[in-house]
Amino acid sequence: MSKEKNVINYYVICNRLKNIIRTGWKSWNVQRERIESVAEHIFGVQMLAIAMKSEYQYDVDIMKVILMLAVHELGETVIGDLTQFQISKEEKEKLEHEAVHKILDYLLDGKQIEKLFLEFDECKTKEAVFAYQCDKLECDLQSKIYDEEGCVDLNNQIENKILENEIVKDLLKNGASWSNMWLKFGQQVYPYDNNFRAVSNYALNNEIIERKNK
């Protein structure tokens, strides 16, 4: 294929992410005119990474992090957005890695891009660890926004399999709101450092949407 064709093909494949709605929000029956797409999540997590680097002065290559996050959901162009409640981490990684390898195979920089994608998944370098924490916290912060907007009714969760998760059940049983449950879930499940935990706790204890009438 020509270079021009390669550019267009890659762009069109990635463009699919604009129309893939995040599965978690569908599972929780989020009621909103527009629900976040995977592409919007990517933008959100990149902006969160910039803010976390700025305020906490992490010793990371932020441009590498931004590029890593730009491609961290690339496999979802093929397999869709599968959550931890639908498929094992190992099975998802296998499917994603096969998809990403195929997508990038024809690009001149494909091997370098694939290396970044795999570095994120392996989560061993300081950039990958930082990016991973941003990826997880962004989802919890988005849930807080939806909750403050009144988009989720916990009494309208027919066939929501996530409610079967023991941590989720315990947190909701103890009176946590939907978004507070997710923020606390993140703190229990993901290896947040003190800075990410502090931001998560701030969201737990404060409204984060700026109200127009204030």
Image (cartoon, rainbow, N blue to C red):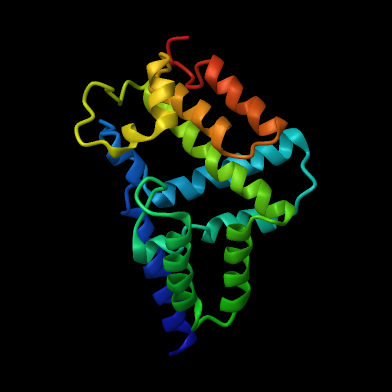
Rendered location of residue 114, percent (x, y): 57, 71
Q: Is residue 135 left or right of residue 213?
A: right
Residue 178 lies in quadrant:
top left
Residue 64 lies in quadrant:
bottom right
Give whichever of 163, 43 is nearer the camera: 163
Looking at the image, the residue that sits furthest to the bottom is 1
Give whichever of 188, 111 is nearer the camera: 188
As displayed, is residue 183 above or below residue 100?
A: above
Residue drawn 47% across and 58% down? 73
Callout count: 0
Q: Is residue 144 left or right of residue 117?
A: left
Rendered location of residue 154, percent (x, y): 28, 22
Give whichever of 170, 206 is nearer the camera: 170
Residue drawn 32% across and 48% down? 21
Residue drawn 45% across and 46% down? 41
Residue 160 lies in quadrant:
top left
Quadrant into which the N terminus falls: bottom left
Looking at the image, the residue that sits furthest to the top is 214
Residue drawn 36% across and 22% down? 149
Q: Is residue 190 left or right of residue 27?
A: right
Rendered location of residue 152, percent (x, y): 30, 25
Rendered location of residue 47, percent (x, y): 58, 42
